[in-house]
Image (spheres, rainbow, N blue to C red):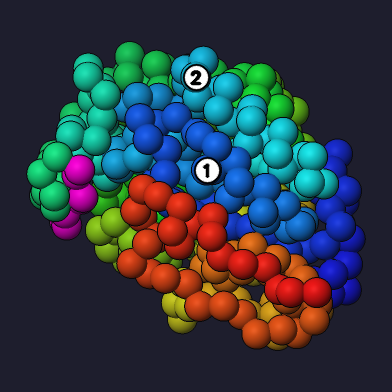
Amino acid sequence: MSLFSSYRLGRLELPNRIVMAPMTRCRAIGGVPNALMRDYYTQRASAGLIITEGTSPSPNGLGYARIPGLYSEPQIAGWRSVVEGVHAAGGRIFVQLMHVGRIAHQNNLPSGARILAPSAVASAGNMWTDQEGLQPLPTPAEMTAADLRETLDEFVQGARNALAAGFDGVELHAANGYLLEQFLHPHTNRRSDDHGGSIARRIRFVLEVVRASAEVLGADRVGVRLSPHGTFNDLPPHAEVEATYAALARELRGVAYLHVINHTHEGFGATAGAIRAAFGGPIVVNGGYDRERADAVLAAKEADLVAFGKPFISNPDLVRRFERQGTLAEAQVATFYTAGAEGYADYPALAG
């Protein structure tokens, strides 16, 4: 088994085990996918599976400047064009549904949208806004029971819209300190109702979103991204990480895959093992892997697929470069989150 082995993932036959990881790139002007984004994803269609950048199912979930949504007709049409490009090039593509929760600034939200989270706990740090530059992150509103129902409905509609756009499936982003992980973490979830407190209650909203999405798409077309031991977006370490993620993984049996981010924490190996044992299904790992490390983790049967992020930014033909053991091009960090084609859709493929 190697990166170049085929793999059956639900109803999809993947030609290799190389996954393009979701990466925010901030090219969706007005929150709508465009022709530039179609070019970017189509160029990378040789990946076994592409997972798109985080895409909001709700105006409330956009948060950052120039990230795409999947809740309006223009957004569905824009994504349909992207999907058609990828499929025409022989690729397979899941959309990552990401609601940012408290990691948002009002300047980056449409009129009338609200910053919501499990509890009214502000995140440390600043966020870029095109209007005023860097701004401190505000305190979110604690979600009411009505907010929970509405947000769940928005995720479900996002799954329906993903089908309408032609996506092969959906990845639900329960990692990196965004809304779904905010429910999992005791620092951001201080609720005293049936969605907070114990592990069983803290994982409840994630399970509700996953199960409702699976009813729309089929469980084999729903993946879930997790980041145990991650501290991104002001999440402090806590003592119940392994127990939380093992319990969650056990309840997620039957979905297409779990996409687990390796933060190189000393406890990651034990937690990842507990997740794999509890879940019993396909595991995607992500987090600084190169070809050698990726092949090693596959050979050890610690994962079934390996996701690559930054290498795909500057190497649209990453699969071919790995096959040829070619040199990887360096990415232009300064253009990761700018608005144009430079450092986005202008990286050349290998000659010949």
Residue sitting nearer the eye, 234 or 62: 62
Task: Give the residue type that dot 2 points to.
Answer: Pro
Q: Quadrant of residue 103?
A: top left
Question: Disc 1 versus disc 2: distance between alpha carbons?
Answer: 15 Å
Residue 98 makes an appearance in the image: no
Identify the residue shown where x is 18% and y is 34%. Answer: 107
Using a 10 Å C-alpha cutoff, classify the residue at mark 1 as few (fewer than 14 neighbours), some (14 to 19) or many (20 or more): some
Task: Give the residue type that dot 1 points to.
Answer: Leu
Residue farthest toward the front in the current orientation of the protein: 352
Residue sitting nearer the eye, 94 or 265: 94
What span is colored magenta in the figure? 123-130
Q: Is 230 positioned to the left or the right of 313 in the image?
A: left
Does 350 appear above or below 73? below
Q: Is label 2 in a helix, a strand or a loop?
A: helix
Label 1 belongs to which residue?
36
Q: Quadrant of residue 189?
A: top left
Identify the residue shown where x is 35% and y is 24%. Answer: 59
Instruction: Say whether marks 1 and 2 touch (CB < 8 Å).
Output: no
Q: Is label 1 in a helix, a strand or a loop?
A: helix
Q: Is 187 positioned to the left or the right of 278 in the image?
A: left
**Looking at the image, how many numbered discs can be counted on the residues?**
2
Label 2 belongs to which residue?
74
Identify the residue shown where x is 55% and y is 28%. Answer: 78
> Where in the figure is residue 204, as x and y percent of width and height?
47, 34
Q: Is 32 positioned to the left or the right of 297 in the image?
A: left
Q: Which labelled disc corresponds to residue 132?
A: none
Identify the residue shown where x is 78% and y is 63%. Answer: 17
> Where in the figure is residue 72, as x and y percent of width and height?
47, 17
- Earlier in the chain: of badge 1 and badge 2, it is 1
Q: Does the magenta portion include 312?
A: no
Q: Quadrant of the C terminus?
A: bottom right
Residue sitting nearer the eye, 103 or 66: 66
